[in-house]
């Protein structure tokens, strides 16, 4: 073996060992940071942003400056709980769940509705050096720039740095809005039921016109009806979104006329059963209040 090959092999081994050692050091640091910070309540000292959709929103932190493109911006003083700390090569990521949610408006038909959004952020704190070189004390000194740490929520709430933000209130008449919204959905549902029943009646009329006097067609027709009728189930949601193929049953056809009759029988039975069973799917407007309980 040549000398340069030996040297290359030695360098590769050394680099590999350095990588392993570096990863182990970061892992130990991460364990120490989580042991000290995970579950702590903090008052965030800088501006942050979150999409408030239950997922974390990245916030890049350099010194005392932050950059993020979250939908909701929050001024300094937010209270959050530390969920986890991840040590990377030259940064430390701190995942926070904000104590207060936000109220998010959205539109459905003519109604403005609201839902609560849980706000989570991931602060990517750039260290300006390798994490293993910065060490535990150095990382925590960076944390001190951004966090006022508390063991208990009550202590964080009593902090002068807390910005006192609370989630917005629902509109005063929101309960009435929700009842009106549920009634609107019931009316739409009932119209859909009526339209599907009318469409099935028309399809039944057209299919009956296709019935021909032929022994093979008639045999297939009878088999198709017999196979389809018990297959259609009393499930309003499934019925409203169904087609013949939803419940259709395959069969081996002895000839083309029989196959034609079987197909017609399946469709005929489906539309008859659909119209009959959908009659039980109408909803009463009194169900609106029950839907909110």
Image: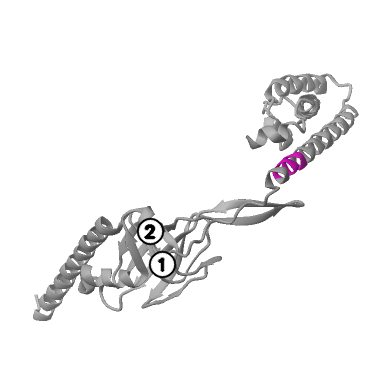
Q: Residue at x 81, y 28 (%)?
A: 275
The residue under label 2 is 156
Give yes or no for residue 179 being in the magenta stretch.
Answer: yes
Q: Secondary structure at mark 2?
A: helix
Give the side of residue 192 with respect to residue 174, left or right: right
Of label 1 and label 2, which has the lower sequence position? 2
Q: Residue at x 65, y 56 (%)?
A: 105
Which of 113/156 is in front?
156
Residue 270 is situated, as x and y percent measured from the top left of the image, at 76, 28
- Contact check, label 1 and label 2, Cβ < 8 Å: no
Residue 264 is situated, as x and y percent measured from the top left of the image, at 80, 28
**Region of the chain picked out in magenta, as a range:** 178-184
> For the stretch drawn in magenta, what is the main secondary structure?
helix
Give yes or no for residue 187 being in the magenta stretch.
Answer: no
Give the side of residue 27 with respect to residue 46, left or right: left
Residue 153 is situated, as x and y percent measured from the top left of the image, at 38, 54
Which of 63/168 is in front?
168
Residue 218 is situated, as x and y percent measured from the top left of the image, at 82, 20
Which numbered dot is residue 161? 1
Up-down relation of residue 3 to residue 36 (above or below) = below
Say which quadrant the N terminus sits in. bottom left
Disc 2 crowd rating (10 Å Cα; few below 14, some 14-19, many 20+) is many
Q: Residue at x 70, y 54 (%)?
A: 107
Alpha-carbon span between mark 1 and mark 2: 9 Å
Up-down relation of residue 190 to residue 6 (above or below) = above
Residue 91 visible in this rendered orientation of the protein? no
Q: Residue at x 52, y 70 (%)?
A: 69
Which of 251/38 is in front?
38
Which numbered dot is residue 193? none
Disc 1 crowd rating (10 Å Cα; few below 14, some 14-19, many 20+) is some
């Amino acid at each position: 073996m040549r000398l340069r090959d030996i040297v290359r092999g030695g360098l590769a081994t050394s680099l590999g060992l350095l990588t392993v050692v570096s990863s182990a050091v970061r892992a130990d640091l991460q364990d120490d940071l989580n042991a000290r910070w995970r579950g702590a309540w903090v008052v965030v000292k800088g501006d942050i942003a979150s999409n408030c959709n239950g997922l974390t929103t990245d916030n890049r932190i350099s010194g005392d400056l932050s950059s993020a493109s979250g939908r909701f911006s929050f001024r300094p003083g937010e209270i959050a709980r530390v969920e986890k700390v991840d040590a990377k090569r030259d940064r430390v990521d701190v995942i926070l769940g904000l104590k207060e949610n936000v109220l998010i408006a959205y539109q459905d038909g003519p109604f403005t509705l609201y839902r609560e959004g849980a706000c989570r952020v991931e602060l990517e704190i750039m260290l300006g050096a390798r994490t293993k070189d910065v060490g535990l004390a150095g990382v925590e000194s960076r944390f001190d720039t951004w966090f006022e740490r508390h063991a208990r929520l009550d202590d964080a709430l009593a902090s002068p740095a807390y910005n006192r933000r609370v989630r917005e209130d629902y509109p005063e008449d929101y309960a009435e809005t929700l009842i009106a919204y549920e009634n609107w959905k019931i009316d739409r549902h009932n119209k859909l039921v009526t339209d599907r029943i009318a469409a099935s009646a028309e399809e039944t009329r057209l299919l009956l016109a296709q019935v021909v006097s032929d022994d093979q067609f008639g045999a297939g027709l009878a088999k198709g009806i017999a196979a389809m009728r018990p297959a259609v189930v009393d499930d309003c949601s499934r019925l409203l979104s169904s087609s013949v193929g939803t419940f259709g049953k395959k069969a081996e056809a002895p000839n083309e006329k029989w196959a034609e009759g079987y197909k017609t029988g399946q469709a005929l039975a489906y539309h008859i059963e659909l119209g009959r069973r959908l009659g039980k799917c109408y909803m009463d407007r009194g169900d609106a209040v029950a839907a909110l309980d």
